[in-house]
Image (spheres, rainbow, N blue to C red):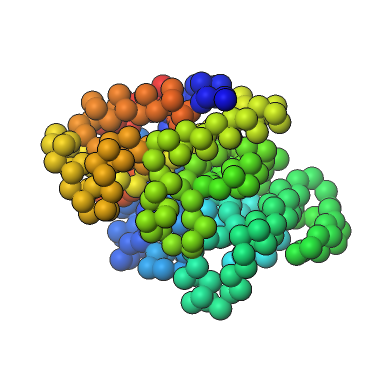
Amino acid sequence: MPTSRQFPRKPFRFGVQANSAPDRKSWVDLSKRVEANGYSVLTLPDHFTDQLAPMPALMCAADVTSTLRLGALVWDNDYKHPAVLAKELATMDVLSDGRLELGIGAGWMISDYEQAGIQYDRPGVRIDRFVEGLHIIKSAMGEGPFSHEGEHYTITDYNGFPKPVQGPHPPVIIGGGGKRVLTIAAQQADIVGVNGSLHAGVIGPDAIATMTGEVITDKVALVADVAEAAGRLEHIEMNIRTFFVSVTYDRAGQVAGMAQMIGVEESMIEESPFALIGSPDHMIETIQARREQYGFSYVIVGPDELEAFAPVVAALAGK
C-alpha cells in the first residue's frame, strides 16, 4: 500500500481558521495579527451559524494585509449557483491581487440546510452536484465561452468574467473524509484536506471516531493511490485542519483533560493527527514527523492559538 512518503516533501505553511468578530476593528486586528505572526493563510468556514460571511470578511482582510492568502474551508456548492460563485471568487482573486485559495465542497452540515430550507439530498446526489459545480467554476475561469449540460446544471455559451489573476484558476482545495470525495480531491484538487467522516451531518462521536491515526493513514494512502494513478502525486499539497490544539508544558494533563472532555481514550488524542498538544519544541517535532508519515505540510489552527503557536510557525514556515 502506498505511504505518504510518496508525496513530495513540500515546504511547511500555516493558516488560521477564524469564525467571527464583534466588529470591523476586531476583524481587521485579527487579520493583521495572522499576517504579522507569519501565517500564510486566513480562512473561514461557510455556514449559517454565528460566523461572518466569508466573502466580504475575506475581502476586508485582503484590504488590510499585503501577503496573506485568503479562502474558505470550504464554500458549499449548494448555497450558490456555481456560475454565480465562480464570478464572485474570480472577482475576489482580482481584487486581492491573486491571493485567493478556492476551497469548495459538497456541503455536509445538516442544520444549515434545515434552517435555510435547502433540500438536504443524500450524499451521492450532493457530491454529483458538487462535481458538476466544480467543473463549471473551473470552466468559467478558463479562456473563452463554454457550455455544460448535466443532471443538475445547464450552462449555454457562457464566458465567465472577470478572469482570475491566478491562471487557469486559483488553487483548488477539497477536503474530504469519505472515499468518493477524497478520490475526487486526488484527481482534481491542488490541495487535499483530510477530514473525519461527516456523513451524519454533525460533528459527533461518529466523526470523532474517524479522526484516529489509523483511519487517517488509510485515507492518506487512498489519496496517494489515486493521485499516483492520475500522475498528480507531485502536484498535490496535503492539508490538515487541527481541532485539538494546546500549547502547554503540561502535556499529560492537557491530553487527559481533552480526552475526558471529548469522551475518548487518551491514546486517541496522543496519536490523532488532528491534535497538537505540548510545548513548541514538541509540536515542531510532531509536525515534522507527520509530514513524513502523512505528507501534511499545510497545517491550520484556530484563532485562539494564534500567538501561542507562532513560535512553531516561525521555526517551520517555508522549510
Q: Relative to residue 209, is residue 217 depicted above or below?
A: above
Question: In the rendered image, which quarter contains the N terminus?
Answer: top right
Q: Quadrant of residue 8?
A: top right
Q: Is residue 242 visible?
A: yes
Image coordinates of residue 196 in percent, x first then y, are 45, 48
Residue 253 placement, left or right of 81: left
Instruction: State the image coordinates of residue 119 (x, y, percent, origin top left).
Output: 61, 73
Q: Is residue 42 visible?
A: no
Where does residue 43 sit, x and y in percent of width and height? 44, 50
When asked about the image quadrant of residue 167, the answer is top right
How many labels, in total?
A: 0
Quadrant in which the C terminus appears: top left
Q: Position of residue 38 (x, y in %)?
A: 35, 35
Where is 79 relative to 248, above or below? below
* 255 left or right, relative to 212: left
Decide which of 306, 293 is in the foreground and name it.
293
**Residue 247 lies in quadrant:** top left
Q: What residue do we see at 63% from left, 41% from top?
A: 183
What's the residue at 48%, 28% (across, down)?
295
